[in-house]
Image (tube, rainbow, N blue to C red):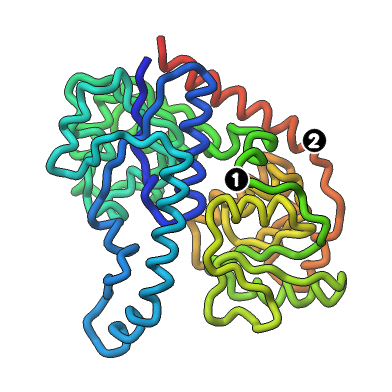
């Protein structure tokens, strides 16, 4: 059976490309012939262009020139990963020719990520497979990114969700949305990155474990993250390595500004401790059995839900902190045997869903 995956594979985001890689390889391990549909959404891709300016004023223009080389390098790094590790369709698709993909695959699977968040895609209904007329439509761990649908968008969702034979979503709120709009039962499944075991991820880190001990910080919107890292570094004497540092990163920290997705995996895999506010930072800390803490930004509600649900499901609620006094909790050992047992239940459920697509 030939399967096409439609997702945000082209984003300059570690989680986006790694979840695509994970779903692709899981399906291949199940015996499917798999291809990632090389579809580009102009609205999403413009943010990654070195020439993108949010507003035309002197400050924004100056920042474009400041960030130009950085964006060029990051585009090249992620392109190299996609070329090496993703089985991309030979045809490059956009909104004008995506209908040509309709008869190529037996099944198209949409997901994971916020592929059903029309605000994020600028109303692109192709992620709801509007273009598909004859191909079997399915999803895996797709997310709406919101807990309720605006009235003016409901008809579009109803029309397109109704054509899906099998629906899998990422959050419980998504299951409820599907039931209310399409009167269909959706399966709630784990993020694709959790479908692959540690050994498979280590195959693409390209390096054996480092003997040097360090603290890894993966910061997205974490206002207190550097404070936590300084405190832990002082307590342990370990250096701090920061993935994707911003301009507020302390000078004494080692900065990995242009880490590739494989560098991202390797840095977490070899760390003694991980401090993160990222869902996938938590996921790979768990996969690689690290001592970690998850630090939540109260302003990032959707992301917080993903992290708290992950920690709840794995019995790791104590790894969640919101004040620096608790940061030394990271030094406590984690019973990863119990964690793996809990994850195995969810992984097997998700694998069964993907196996059933061929029926």
Asked where in the image residue 200 lies, by quadrant, the reply is top right
Which residue reaches farthest top? 359
Residue 125 visible in the displayed image:
yes
Residue denoted by label 2:
338
> Taking 281 as reference, is 40 left or right?
left
Q: Residue at x 64, y 61 (%)?
A: 276
Quarter-of-image position of residue 257: bottom right
Mark-to-mark CA distance, 1 and 2? 17 Å
Residue 301 position, x and y percent, is 50, 59
Residue that mark 1 sits on: 309
**Which residue occupies the foreground of this view, 232 or 117?**
232
Q: Is residue 51 above or below residue 334?
A: below
Q: Quadrant of the C terminus?
A: top left
Q: Nearer the viewer, residue 344 or 178?
A: 344
Residue 289 x, y percent position in the rendering: 76, 45
Question: Can the viewer see residue 298?
Answer: no
Foreground mark, 1 or 2, reads: 2
């Amino acid at each position: 059976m030939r399967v096409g995956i439609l997702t945000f594979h082209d984003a300059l985001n570690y989680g986006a490309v790694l979840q695509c890689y994970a779903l692709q390889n899981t399906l291949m391990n199940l015996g499917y012939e798999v291809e990632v549909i090389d579809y580009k959404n102009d609205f999403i891709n413009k943010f990654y262009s070195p020439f993108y300016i949010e507003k035309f004023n002197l400050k924004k223009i100056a920042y474009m020139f400041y960030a130009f080389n950085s964006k060029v390098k990051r585009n090249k790094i992620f392109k190299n990963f996609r070329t090496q590790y993703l089985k991309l369709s030979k045809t490059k698709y956009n909104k004008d020719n995506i209908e040509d993909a309709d008869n190529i695959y037996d099944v198209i699977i949409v997901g994971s990520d916020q592929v059903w968040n029309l605000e994020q895609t600028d109303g692109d209904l192709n992620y709801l497979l509007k273009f598909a007329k004859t191909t079997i439509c399915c999803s895996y761990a797709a997310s709406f990114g919101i807990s309720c649908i605006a009235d003016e968008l409901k008809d579009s969702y109803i029309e397109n969700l109704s054509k899906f034979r099998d629906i899998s979503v990422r959050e419980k709120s998504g299951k409820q949305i599907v039931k209310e709009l399409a009167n269909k039962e959706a399966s709630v499944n784990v993020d694709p990155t959790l479908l692959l075991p540690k050994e498979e991820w280590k195959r693409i880190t390209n390096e054996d474990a480092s003997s040097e001990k360090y603290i890894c910080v993966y910061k997205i919107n974490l206002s207190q993250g550097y404070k936590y890292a300084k405190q832990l570094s002082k307590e342990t004497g370990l250096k701090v390595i920061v993935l994707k540092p911003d301009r507020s990163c302390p000078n004494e920290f080692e900065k990995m500004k242009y880490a590739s997705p494989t560098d991202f995996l390797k840095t977490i895999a070899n760390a003694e401790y991980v401090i993160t506010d990222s869902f996938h930072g938590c996921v790979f800390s768990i996969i690689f059995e690290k001592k970690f803490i998850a630090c939540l930004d109260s302003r990032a509600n959707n992301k917080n839900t993903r992290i708290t649900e992950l920690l709840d499901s794995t019995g790791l609620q104590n790894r969640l902190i919101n004040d620096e006094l608790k940061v030394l909790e990271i030094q406590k050992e984690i019973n990863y045997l119990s964690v793996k047992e809990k994850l195995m239940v969810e992984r097997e459920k998700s694998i069964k869903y993907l196996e059933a697509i061929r029926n």
